[in-house]
Amino acid sequence: MNILLNVPAAKPPYLAARKALELGPDKVIDQLKLSGLSGRGGAGFPAGVKWDTVKNASASPKYLIINAEESEPGTFKDRQLLTENPHAVIEGALIGALTTGCTQGYIYIRPDYRAPAKAFAKALEEARKDGLLGKNAAGSGKHFDIEVCHGGGAYICGEETALINSLEGKRGEPNTKPPFPANEGFKGKPTLLSNVETFAYVPWILLNGAETYALLGVNGCKGMRLFSVSGDVAKPGNYELPVGVTARELIFKHAGGMRDGKKLKAFIPGGASSSPLPPELLDTPMDFKPLAAAGSMLGSGAVVAISDEHSMLDVARNVMGFFEDESCGKCSPCRIGCVKINEMLDEPATLGAKQPLLNELADGVMQGSLCGLGMAAPNVVKGGLKYWARDFAGK
Ligand SMILES: Cc1cc2nc3c(=O)[nH]c(=O)nc-3n(C[C@H](O)[C@H](O)[C@H](O)COP(=O)(O)O)c2cc1C
Ligand code: SF4
């Protein structure tokens, strides 16, 4: 079944927001915890726990931020969601604000998402007209509205603390954590910052029940999520499927299999930051724990299928080149390490003998970096060396 994509778009009046007001903050948060809804931006943090932290924070005012930077290569689900079902996102954010006490919201959208931003702004106007946003949002007696803001198009500004710095008009680079935004976020105040998709599932969960949502998952997992599937598949696109579906089903059933009869060599399960896996692991359930156990991660749920026409060294060069460009430069393990890794990848003749050094360098970057970019960037090299060492063996 579908909840968010390829369904009639949500519209005012926001029945789930009314239900949230009837239930009250504690019961709403209990529902979120029971549903198992996890953050869809990459880290998979439990939404209910984050909402609880913001609700319990004593400082005020509190802010809410919808992260629509969507910069992880391979990820394009938020674009479709914002364009086709913006009211689901707005209602989810409104429920978040009413539950946790946020009085002002922002959506941070990457600059090239013009059509999604337009659709979202139109939906905001409709919600304001119906009294769902503004001074007495949804009849709650509280103020809440959302302002549309654009970043400059930097990958790192999807990272929550860099996003907040950017929104404050500062250089878009990450801070050390803690403090986390839920306690000290925008302007140093408690901030409920979540991905577009995370907010969008909330109305359905409240209207249909947390247990109903949780039971939609398969292979011991909970709920539904959006998967962006791309690469050498016949039908690239976004697929809304149960959490726990296998990569095999995603690629070979839903995305139509490999394009032009090509043979699968590798798949990246969670965006460019995640380690590529070999076809033998296609039956791993697509959720955080099973993929971590398989040596990769679910991240933003962006699956890239790679055919055997490609060398994994080329894949690693492509991905590491991106991370070198997008490193903000704040910490040296990432700033210098990504360059050094790329220098080694660019010298295939000597790479064979240098594989142990490359592995060590990748570990050093991952362990010494300040934020998730550097902590994950060398995954493509680590996975490449583990499963396709011959591609890195030099020529
Ligand atoms: C380098 C980097 C880039 C990120 N890019 C995004 C992004 O584009 N969109 C997003 O929602 N989260 C992104 N994240 C994750 C955010 O920092 C944050 O965890 C997330 O927005 C929280 O929302 P969630 O709990 O709903 O997942 C990124 C993290 C890192 C380290
Ligand atoms: S890990 Fe990279 S992107 Fe993150 S703070 Fe350090 S230099 Fe910047």
Image (cartoon, rainbow, N blue to C red):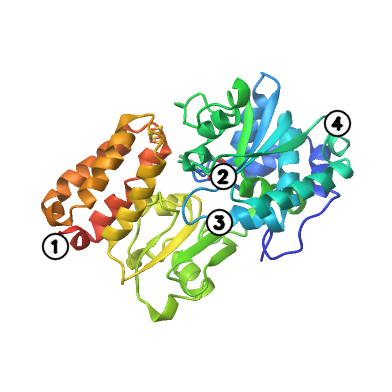
- Which quadrant contains ligand 2? top left
The residue at the point 75 percent across, 46 percent down is 121
Q: Residue furthest bottom?
A: 261
Does the beta carbon at disc 2 come under 8 Å from ligand 1?
yes
Work out whether 100 lies above or below 283. above
Residue under label 1: 395
Q: Position of residue 376 (x, y in %)?
A: 37, 43
User: Crowdedness of circle 3 by 10 Å Cα count: few (<14), some, many (20+)?
Assistant: many
Which numbered disc, 1 or 2, marks the residue that appears first in the sequence? Answer: 2
The residue at the point 47 percent across, 27 percent down is 175
**Quick one: 35 or 195, which is closer to the camera?**
195
Instruction: Give the quarter of the image for residue 99.
Output: top right
Q: Amino acid at mark 4?
A: Lys
Label 3 and label 1: CA atoms lie apart by 36 Å
Which numbered disc, 2 or 3, marks the residue that appears first in the sequence? Answer: 2
Q: Position of residue 239 (x, y in %)?
A: 58, 64
Which of the two discs, 2 and 4, sits closer to the camera?
Answer: 2
Callout 3–callout 1 Cβ contact below 8 Å: no
Residue under label 3: 76
Label 2 and label 4: CA atoms lie apart by 28 Å
Residue under label 2: 69
Label 3 and label 4: CA atoms lie apart by 33 Å
Residue under label 4: 135
Does the beta carbon at disc 3 come under 8 Å from ligand 1?
no
Q: Position of residue 56 (x, y in %)?
A: 66, 25
Which numbered disc, 1 or 4, marks the residue that appears first in the sequence? Answer: 4
In the structure shown, which secondary structural element does the residue marked by tag 1 occupy? loop
Q: Amino acid at mark 2?
A: Glu
